[in-house]
Image (tube, rainbow, N blue to C red):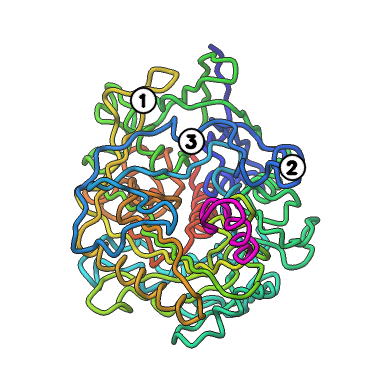
Amino acid sequence: MSTEEYDVVIVGSGAGGGAVAWALTAQKVKVLLLEAGDAYNPTKDYQLDKPQWEQTGFPMKEPHDRFYTFKKMQKLNEQYSSLTSFNHITGKSNKTNRRQPGAYHHLRAVGGSTLMFSGEAHRLNPNAMKMKTRFGVAADWPMDYKELEPFYETAEKVIGVSGQSEGNPLSPKTAPYPLPPHKISYSSSIISAAKHGINFVPNSLAILSKPYDGRAACNYCGGCLRGCMLKDKGSTDVTFIAKALSTGYLTIKTQSAAVNIEAGPNDKVVQIQYVDDKMRYQSAKGKIFIVSCGAVHTPRLLLLSNNRYSPDGLCNEYGLVGRNFMETLLCSISGLYDKRIESYRGLPADIISWDYNNPDAIKDVIGGCRFTAGAIEADFTGPINYALRVAGGFGKQHKDEMRKSFGNVLTIKAIGENLPNKKSYVGLDKKKRDAYGMPLPKICSYLDEMELKRLKFMVEKSTEVLKATGVSKIIEQSSTYDIFNSTHVFGTCRMGTDMKESAVNQFCQSFKWKNLFVVDSSVFPSSGGGESPSLTINALALRTAKYITGNDK
């Protein structure tokens, strides 16, 4: 086993790891980035130009569900049966009386899950940062919005965010976005113009509306979730990591899975042990260590890193690692429009409504939500999905239905706040292990009454908006009421000012292990009212890097 030495060792190359790597290497800090997955070549690996594009989805090099397990979930509450997921042809998606595990959409790759995200680039609503003080739930962020604002602005410039100058009026901006907003698709204009009482505006997107920083503008193929071949989507690999590599101070090791962070004397981490692409055990030493594996795999690595100096794992002196897990609260309602609108064209979420984003915006509910157009995100993009999910019948009847329905689905999607509770956490699976013999993370998910009430509002309001557009029939409904389905996960390594209530401090630094940092969504004290988290992760990473470069001894 060989040992290498760097200034900083980072585990994970997603929105957090990639951004902090760029900020550090820009200051001539020697960085090693360990990535358990592989690198993707956009022009070779993505399938949008292949006949099988619709069937392959995002071209996973390894199945994501191999790397986590689920605890048995709660029984369904008949009071909320209106939230049941269904398709008008196949019926209920979950035919049991218990909530079922779907997927945690996590990608092990250089750039992480940003490779397959829809490009939404949101700032967190400042009103969602003081949930404990204002409502007695979750926890307060240990900084205010003004402290994050300059880091948001830097991240937006690196990525190339397109949007209205004012963005979300609830999250004030001191400077315009680098690029103007995208033009709204025809199908989204129908949603915006309908008389439903909700205000839709152009979404802020990490997708180029004009050529920028050597990258081409979007061609509006709608394939964002399948991997962007043109590199106009600001995924971490083509933005932060590409810039970090150009400095000459970044080394990336792919297919290198961290298995242990070794704690030593004097409250310092000594080294990280990992298995390389040839299944050999290696170690890397540094002055600083940063974990950026996401809210499921970060707690797993910290809990596995136990020895005589850290008997309960790292950052876990008060048993908080893995606790306060917050998932994606989501619904998607689809209906059939009676005219040809070609809703498969354009961007996945080109319009958005912030009307209910404030944490007190929904009557009798704590925590907000947002609404977007969502036909492309719901994968109504090609003929196969229409044949299976929209057009009924057989033979000539099926052909006639295909001719009438193809391209005519409208979808409203909503994402809402998820508040932490004691029954939702990430632990270690005592029975199932990975290829290296290490316990897999186990996702334990529970939706309490407040979540179900918020989700009920989201489903009802989405349906109301959709019907106002003039759809002739609701053909599909999906929600996290009966099926776990998360892309945005948070909270399992909460940051704060008190180590008895938080795992890391306001700079994402371990309270005890002074050269150990956590930079990803696991540090979020609250989830926000449906904002996409990647830009906030970027901002936190840049803030942490600034702190490290002044405190790296």
Q: Which residue in the protein does label 2 denote?
A: 50
Label number found at residue 64: 3
Rendered location of residue 254, percent (x, y): 61, 29
Residue annotated with mark 1: 264
> Does the magenta stretch mainly form a helix, a strand or a loop?
helix
C-alpha span from label 2 to label 1: 51 Å
Residue at screen point 54% across, 15% down = 279
Tell me the amino acid under the disc marked 2: Lys
- Between 352 and 258, the residue placed more toward the observer is 352
Could you say whether the residue bearing mark 3 is in a helix, strand or loop? helix
Residue 497 on the magenta segment: no
**Circle 2 Cα neighbour tier, 10 Å, few/some/many (<14 / 14–19 / ≥20):** few
Identify the secondary structure beneath mark 2. loop
Compared to residue 131, the image places residue 108 above or below, namely above
The answer to whether any part of residue 27 appears in the image is no
Quadrant housing residue 35: top right
N-term mark: 2 or 1: 2
Q: Amino acid at mark 3?
A: His
Q: Residue furthest top?
A: 1
| Of the image marks 1 and 3, the number of the one nearer the N terminus | 3
Residue 42 appearing in the image: yes
**Whether residue 5 is situated above or below residue 107 in the rendered picture:** above
